[in-house]
Image: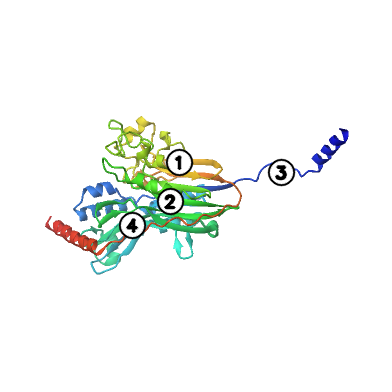
């Protein structure tokens, strides 16, 4: 027996000693920011079919919500948080043309302006690129159509076109910015489209949505990061497009086994669809034939992500202090129609809905998370717009530091590319006729 004990003790002291602790996890910080295209599209749509009035309304608001003033503040937010990757929504390009025969001239490019401002802070960011591809997915656009989208702005157009007016349009999209010191860590990237679209005017005004994604090496691991902006417009008695798009997103990502982060503007509050008698100042989806139950998981993009196996890695969605949408269209404070409701909910800055999130899958956990840009009239991103105090965007931003297991993972295949359905010849002819008829209507008024 003694010999056995001696042998066991010898084995104990000669056996290799395991490390006192496992390898430290890799920390990766991400940030989601909706830049705001600068104008209230909902109000502009109510002016249709008077296209020039709608175009002038939007252009005037874009000038007032001056992105040149907002961009440095958004860049300073990024410099403070120092995320590895920023998910951008409403990366807007405004372009105009002199006449029917001229080409489009870019007047404002929010993404380029923001990138330029980040370089000034000392924490620079660039659009994610690899080979000939970039992580920028143009969403819906309004074309610059002579006569129909004419706007008057001598200050802007005289230097460009030597005339007081021009026809203008815009494109908004999703993008992924990567901190400059991490650009070489990009392994693959791409863009994709959602099959569910919303047509305001078929062919002429169809709202496309999609997402951009990239794979980023982090320590020994590699993480897949997605940014998206789901549809905000909804119709009564049908399932919102945001839900259909979220379902597709979950399906597209279901085969991803590597660490996964999805962020963006999902246009869904956990309370949607709202009951008929519920306070709903943000005019979120309400119950109807297709969605008869309030807060239905079957009719809500947020719950679609949760039921798809994703974990909310951003602050508590049910805490009113973490609501992310509520600023007025001119950014000069909370939306006046929502202030009282926000106070009733428990938010003192006018925010009434939670629409922006960071979701994760296949990660170790979350070290920290925050909502920012949601205080008024003081805050890090408040600026003086005339004699008023203005937000930097109509949405608050969301950031999180995610913990990854520091080990090699199999890099999954590229995500599917769902291309837009091409416009056929008859649709093109129909669009041309529609434009002509609208032009005649506008000219008669």
Give the mark, 1 or 2, whose residue is nearer the N terminus.
Answer: 2
> How many angstroms separate mark 3 from mark 2 (CA)?
39 Å
Give the alpha-carbon distance from disc 1 to disc 3, as whole Å.
38 Å
Q: Secondary structure at mark 2?
A: helix
Give the foreground label among 4 and 1. 4
Disc sitting over residue 252 in the figure:
2
Mark 4 vs 1, N-terminal side:
4
Tell me, what colour scheme is on the image? rainbow
Q: Residue 363 falls in which quadrant of the image? A: top right
Q: State the residue position of label 1.
A: 371
Q: Residue at x 27, y 47 (%)?
A: 42
For image coordinates 50% across by 59% down, the residue present is: 188
Horizontal side of residue 155 vs 250, given as left or right: left
Q: Secondary structure at mark 1?
A: strand
Query: Looking at the image, do the residues carrying marks 1 and 2 touch, with CB atoms under 8 Å apart?
Result: no
- Please, is residue 275 above or below residue 118 in the view? above
């Amino acid at each position: 027996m003694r010999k056995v004990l001696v042998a066991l003790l010898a084995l104990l002291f000669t056996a290799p000693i395991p490390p006192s602790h496992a390898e430290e996890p890799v920390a990766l910080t991400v940030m989601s920011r909706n830049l705001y295209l600068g104008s209230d599209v909902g109000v502009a749509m109510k002016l249709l079919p008077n296209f020039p009035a709608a175009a002038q309304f939007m252009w005037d608001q874009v000038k007032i919500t001056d992105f040149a003033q907002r961009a440095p503040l958004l860049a300073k937010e990024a410099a403070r948080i120092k995320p590895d990757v920023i998910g951008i929504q409403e990366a807007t390009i405004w372009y105009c043309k002199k006449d029917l025969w001229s080409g489009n001239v870019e007047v404002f490019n929010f993404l380029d302006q923001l990138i330029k401002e980040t370089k000034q802070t000392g924490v620079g960011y660039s659009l994610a690129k690899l080979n000939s591809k970039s992580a920028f997915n143009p969403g819906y656009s309004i074309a610059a159509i002579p006569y129909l989208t004419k706007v008057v702005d001598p200050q802007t157009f005289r230097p460009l076109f030597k005339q007081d007016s021009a026809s203008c349009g815009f494109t908004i999209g999703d993008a992924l910015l990567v901190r400059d010191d991490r650009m070489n860590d990009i392994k693959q990237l791409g863009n994709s489209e959602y099959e569910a679209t919303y047509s305001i005017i078929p062919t002429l005004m169809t709202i496309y949505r999609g997402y951009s994604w990239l794979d980023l090496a982090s320590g020994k691991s590699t993480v897949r990061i997605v940014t998206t902006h789901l549809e905000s417009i909804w119709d009564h008695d049908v399932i919102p497009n945001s839900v259909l798009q979220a379902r597709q997103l979950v399906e597209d990502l279901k085969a991803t086994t590597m660490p996964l982060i999805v962020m963006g503007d999902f246009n869904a509050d956990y309370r949607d669809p709202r009951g008929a008698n519920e306070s709903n100042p943000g005019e979120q989806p309400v119950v109807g034939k297709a969605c008869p139950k309030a807060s239905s998981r079957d009719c809500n993009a947020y719950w679609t992500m949760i039921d798809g196996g994703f974990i909310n890695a951003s602050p508590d969605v049910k805490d009113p202090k973490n609501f992310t949408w509520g600023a007025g269209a001119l950014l000069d404070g909370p939306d006046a129609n929502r202030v009282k409701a926000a106070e009733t909910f428990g938010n003192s800055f006018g925010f009434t809905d939670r629409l922006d999130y960071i979701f994760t899958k296949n990660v170790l956990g979350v070290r920290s998370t925050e909502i920012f840009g949601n205080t008024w009239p003081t805050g890090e991103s408040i600026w003086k717009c005339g004699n008023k105090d203005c937000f930097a965007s109509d949405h608050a931003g969301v950031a999180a530091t995610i913990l990854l297991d520091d080990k090699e993972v199999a890099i999954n295949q590229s995500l599917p590319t769902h291309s837009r359905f091409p416009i056929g010849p008859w649709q093109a002819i129909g669009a041309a006729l529609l434009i002509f008829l609208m032009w005649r209507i506008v000219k008669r008024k």
